[in-house]
């Protein structure tokens, strides 16, 4: 029987590694819930929009001028920040799912 980490009590674990897996699994679940919330959807949607707007604006920049190079750097930073946010969310969810698998594997031994 599969059990999500949010439904398990942390004192059920025997090793420190199991506690770490539990914390990672719980964090992944929390990020999933956050991204399904109104605020999470808003922030993730804004990040996607920022990334797309930066990509579009980059196509219009002239790298041969000082102003163009400065604008390119600003847009690259804008895109990178949005990308980092989305990647951090994805990584937290992936790490959480992997931790859940480890907990299940440890529990079945």
Image: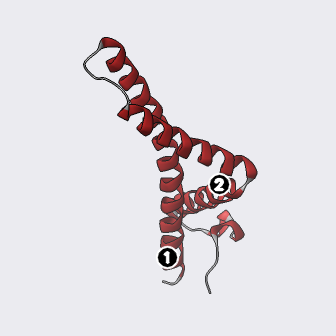
The answer to whether residue 94 is above or below residue 109 is above
Residue farthest to the bottom, as pictured = 1
Q: Nearer the viewer, residue 10 or 46?
A: 46
- State the image coordinates of residue 8 (x, y, percent, origin top left): 68, 70
- Label 2 and label 1: CA atoms lie apart by 29 Å
- State the image coordinates of residue 102 (x, y, percent, origin top left): 48, 71
Residue farthest to the left, as pictured = 64
- At mark 1, the secondary structure is helix
**Which of marks 1 and 2 precedes in the sequence?**
2
Q: Residue at x 55, y 57 (%)?
A: 24
Asked where in the image residue 14 lies, by quadrant, the reply is bottom right
Q: Residue at x 48, y 35 (%)?
A: 81
Q: Residue at x 63, y 61 (%)?
A: 29
- At mark 2, the secondary structure is helix
Badge 1 density bin: few <14, some 14–19, many ≥20, Cα 10 Å: few
- State the image coordinates of residue 87 (x, y, percent, origin top left): 47, 49
The answer to whether residue 68 is above or below residue 32 is above
Q: What quarter of the picture does the N terminus occupy?
A: bottom right
Q: Nearer the viewer, residue 90 or 49?
A: 49
Display coloring: secondary structure
- Say which mark, if any, is on residue 35: 2
- Horizontally, residue 96 falls left or right of residue 12, namely left
Badge 2 density bin: few <14, some 14–19, many ≥20, Cα 10 Å: some
Residue hosting label 1 = 106
């Amino acid at each position: 029987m599969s059990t999500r980490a949010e439904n398990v009590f942390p004192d059920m674990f025997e090793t420190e590694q199991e506690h770490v897996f539990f914390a990672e699994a719980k964090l992944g679940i929390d990020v999933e819930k956050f991204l399904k919330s109104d605020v999470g959807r808003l922030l993730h949607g804004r990040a996607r929009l920022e990334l797309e707007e930066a990509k579009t604006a980059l196509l219009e920049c002239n790298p041969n001028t000082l102003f163009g190079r400065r604008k390119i750097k600003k847009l690259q930073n804008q895109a990178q920040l949005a990308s980092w946010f989305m990647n951090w969310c994805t990584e937290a969810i992936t790490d959480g799912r992997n931790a859940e698998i480890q907990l299940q594997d440890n529990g079945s031994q």
